[in-house]
Image: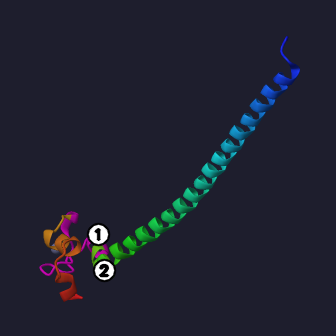
Amino acid sequence: MNQDPFTDFQRLATEADSLARDLNAFRQELNRVLEQNAELMIENKHLRGRLDQLSGQNKQIDKPEMLPSRRNLEKLYDSGFHICNEMYGARRENNEPCAFCTSIIYGNGDRTSSRV
Ligand SMILES: [Zn+2]
């Protein structure tokens, strides 16, 4: 070490300053990222809630499409009875499927509404 101690000190001080500046910039960047992360988490939460709301609405839209009367008919059909105009109330032999019945339950025909 034949250098002037004061020069050494100057150099170290400059390095320390620059290190402090870097550290400060890094901390600001870290804060910015953390803030952004928090914002995104909140936004994500809101969007998730909105999504749940929308899918909940969809469920509510889907359900009325299957009218309660239609569901009752389905229950009747499932327990082995015809619900079609052709054989209404008759037992379905061996649970054989009936195209008329299923078209009433699952089709978009208005035959149920004319009956109910
Ligand atoms: Zn039938």
Q: Is residue 90 left or right of residue 26?
A: left
Q: Is mark 2 within 8 Å of ligand 1?
A: no
Q: What is the x, y in percent for residue 104?
A: 19, 75
Question: Main SS type for the magenta part?
Answer: loop
Instruction: Tell which circle, 1 or 2, labels the residue nearer the N-terminal end.
Output: 2
Residue shown at the point (85%, 11%) measured from the top left: 2
Which quadrant holds residue 24? Answer: top right
Residue 109 is situated, as x and y percent measured from the top left of the image, at 16, 78
Q: Residue furthest left?
A: 86
Which label was assigned to residue 87?
Answer: none
Q: Is residue 26 left or right of residue 102?
A: right
The image quadrant that residue 88 belongs to is bottom left
Secondary structure at numbered mark 1: helix
Q: Do the residues under discs 1 and 2 have CB atoms within 8 angstroms?
A: no
Residue 39 % position (x, y): 58, 59
Where is the N terminus found, in terms of image quarters?
A: top right
Q: Residue visible at 48% across and 64% down? A: 47
Magenta stretch?
75-95
Q: Residue at x 58, y 54 (%)?
A: 36
Residue indicated by mark 1: 78
> Callout 1, which amino acid?
Asp
Relative depth, front residue between 22 and 27: 22
In the image, residue 2 above or below residue 37:
above
Please state the horizontal and vertical placement of residue 105, each as a whole percent of the image: 23, 74
Measured along the vertical axis of the image, is residue 11 above or below residue 20? above
Residue at image location 12% in from the left, 79% down from the top: 86
Say which residue label 2 marks.
67
Tell whether position 92 is magenta. Answer: yes
Residue 53 among magenta residues: no
Mark 1, Cα crowd under 10 Å, few <14 / some 14-19 / many 20+, is few
